[in-house]
């Protein structure tokens, strides 16, 4: 085992405490303090929109972090500098608890810092391994995910209490202290790390250069249909940006990004063979691998739509449930990391070996497809609980344990597996960027939530939902459940033809 791994693991544990410590009390703080000037009937929707906009930022900025790392500064320096930005964001939350603009500035800095380092820490772990010891890598990625949830568990349990008893400055200040400790721990291991120098800037056969060649090259006697598809995507993206006044900037911008990536990727795939000659075969095949990966990542986005709503929709549902007076709704989220810490060793020591003895190969893609399906089942259960509440019944909060268990099993199968999968499939020069695309799938997942929330505000949609005899909340829950189950089926079908790669360094 590389001796530098404990520094990265300890850094991640403290950083995750800091992130989940502030994230898991964010909705409650917005509802009870910062947004009190908004009428109560509109406050829930506004708090939910702010929360998911923040999460979109957290999982969008990995693109920036991956780009800076792969082209200019390398993973170590990018992580260190953005961690300092992250610390400044926490300081703003603690200082500006009563100032909306100052508080939102803090959220922006945390989104920039947390999002920027998110793909780099996991891929930096992968850099510490090579082909000789890569068998240890999945175990370390599981340990990495375990420590994430160790930090999340205590943050979810303690921060709502600190918010209630000591106020927002203390509750947001403690995560800031933990983030500073995380930065110091990471810096202290600086002499032990394997650092891979950035190469993308000077690489004549980088991903974007191969894509540009493929799109602009003419085949003999052929047109450029792929370029036409990419241009259509660009025009649709401009149209999406023009809808900013109606949709809001975040929805419009993220939709534009999805259109550019989707249509641009499809166009490049159509003409990719034209890049052979100007670029070597391994560079062209690397682009093909990335495009295949992006399809898989796109099919994972419905999972994140469901998963991240446990900190918004599920907390708001918990507010309606019967519970002890001392128990805060947001404390229920501590169940998720507690279950993760149990399930990761249980799966690795018991479930996977048992399935292997039964002759069933538990591949990374099979795990991920099953995980998406489990998230859909969780939302069927939580939708049933909402129907029960809507009928005027008193429902104990302990009923939420079942959907939390199903959703957490899905998380372990999708997220813990996906970290190592994304790293192992990425070409050597694109580790940071590919892990950024993995994190971008979370952004798109939260985009679906914002779009679903925006759609139910229309009069015609509201009238249709009322005609079904269910509340808007329950209807959306069953919609998201179906969304995930369809995505799980498509993921399984696509994964059957995917060719696995082994892109660890020699």
Image: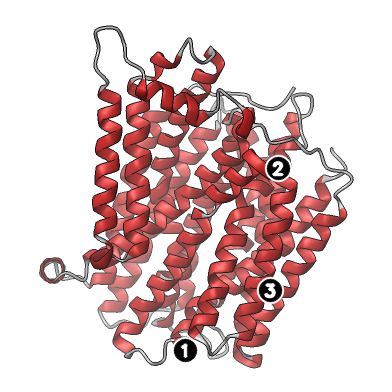
What is the C-alpha distance between the residues marked 3 and 1? 20 Å
Residue 32's disc is 1
Q: Residue 220 at x, y = what percent?
A: 29, 7
Left or right for 310, reference 114: left
Where disc 2 sits, the SS reads helix
Residue 450 sits above or below residue 493 on the image = below
Pick whichever, 380 or 156, lies toward us. 156
Mark 3 and mark 1 lie on one chain; the one further toward the N terminus is 1
Residue in the image at 60% along x and 54% along y: 116
Q: Position of residue 272 (x, y in %)?
A: 40, 19
Mark 3 touching mark 1, by CB under 8 A?
A: no
Taking the spot 64% from the left edge, 74% from the top edge, the residue there is: 90
Location of residue 393 in the rendering, given as x and y in whole percent from the top left corner: 31, 81
Are circles 2 and 3 on residues that touch, CB within 8 Å? no
> Of the residues under marks 2 and 3, which one precedes in the sequence?
2
Spatial separation of the CA atoms under disc 2 and disc 1: 42 Å
Query: Which of pointers 2 and 3 indicates the residue nearer the eye?
Result: 2
In the rendering, which numbered label is found on residue 175? 3
Residue 378 lies in quadrant: bottom left
Residue 208 versus residue 15: which sits nearer the camera? 208
- Residue situated in front as seen by the camera: 79 or 306: 79
Which residue is tagged 2? 74
In this rendered view, identify the residue nearer to me: 416 or 393.
416
Tag 2–tag 1 contact (CB < 8 Å):
no
| N-terminal label among 2 and 1 | 1
Classed neighbour count for the residue bearing mark 3: other residues with Cα under 10 Å, few (<14), some (14–19), many (≥20): many
Seen in the image, is 136 located left or right of residue 216? right
Residue 166: x %, y % from top left: 66, 91
Number of labelled discs? 3
The N terminus sits in image quarter: top right
- Residue at 47% of width from left, 77% of height from top? 27
Q: Badge 2 local density, few (<14 within 10 Å), some, or many (20+)?
A: many
């Amino acid at each position: 085992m590389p001796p530098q791994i404990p520094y990265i693991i300890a850094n991640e544990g403290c950083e995750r405490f800091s992130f989940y410590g502030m994230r898991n009390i964010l909705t409650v703080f917005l509802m009870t303090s910062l947004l009190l000037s908004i009428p109560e009937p509109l406050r829930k929707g506004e708090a939910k929109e702010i929360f998911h906009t923040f999460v979109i930022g957290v999982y969008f900025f990995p693109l920036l972090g991956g780009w800076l790392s792969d082209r200019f500064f390398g993973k170590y320096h990018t992580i260190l500098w953005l961690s300092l930005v992250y610390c400044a964001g926490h300081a703003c939350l603690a200082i500006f608890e009563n100032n909306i603009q100052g508080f939102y500035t803090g959220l922006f800095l945390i989104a920039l810092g947390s999002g920027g380092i998110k793909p780099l820490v996991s891929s930096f772990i992968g850099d510490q391994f090579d082909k000789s010891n890569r068998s240890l890598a999945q175990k370390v990625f599981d340990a990495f995910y375990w420590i994430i949830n160790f930090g999340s568990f205590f943050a979810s349990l303690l921060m709502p209490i600190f918010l209630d008893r000591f106020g927002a400055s203390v509750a947001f200040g403690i995560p800031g202290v933990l983030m500073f400790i995380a930065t110091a721990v990471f810096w202290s291991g600086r002499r032990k790390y394997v650092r891979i120098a950035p190469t993308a800037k000077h690489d004549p056969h980088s991903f974007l250069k191969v894509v540009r060649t493929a799109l602009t090259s003419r085949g003999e006697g052929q047109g450029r249909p792929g370029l036409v598809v990419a241009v259509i995507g660009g025009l649709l993206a401009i149209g999406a940006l023009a809808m900013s006044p109606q949709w809001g900037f975040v929805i419009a911008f993220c939709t534009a990004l999805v259109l550019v990536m989707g249509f641009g990727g499809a166009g490049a795939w159509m003409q990719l063979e034209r890049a052979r000659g100007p670029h070597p075969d391994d560079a062209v095949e690397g682009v093909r691998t990335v495009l295949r990966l992006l399809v898989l990542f796109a099919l994972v986005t419905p999972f994140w739509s469901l998963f991240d709503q446990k900190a918004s929709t599920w907390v708001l549902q918990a507010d309606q449930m019967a519970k002890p007076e001392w128990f805060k709704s947001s404390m229920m989220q501590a169940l998720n990391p507690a279950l993760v810490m149990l399930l990761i060793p249980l799966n690795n020591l018991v479930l996977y070996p048992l399935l292997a003895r039964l002759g069933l190969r538990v591949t990374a893609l099979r795990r991920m497809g099953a995980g998406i399906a489990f998230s859909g089942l969780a939302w069927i259960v939580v939708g049933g609980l909402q129907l029960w509440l809507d009928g005027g019944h008193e429902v104990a909060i302990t009923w939420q344990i079942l959907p939390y268990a199903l959703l957490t099993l899905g998380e372990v199968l999708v997220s813990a597996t996906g970290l190592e999968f994304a790293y192992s499939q990425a070409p050597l020069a694109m580790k940071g960027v590919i892990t950024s695309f993995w994190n971008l799938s979370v952004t798109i997942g939260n985009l679906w939530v914002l779009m679903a929330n925006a759609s139910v505000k229309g009069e015609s949609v509201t009238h249709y939902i009322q005609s079904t005899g269910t509340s808007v909340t329950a209807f959306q829950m069953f919609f998201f459940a179906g969304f995930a189950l369809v995505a799980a089926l498509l993921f399984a079908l696509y994964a059957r033809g995917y060719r696995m790669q082994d892109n660890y360094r020699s």
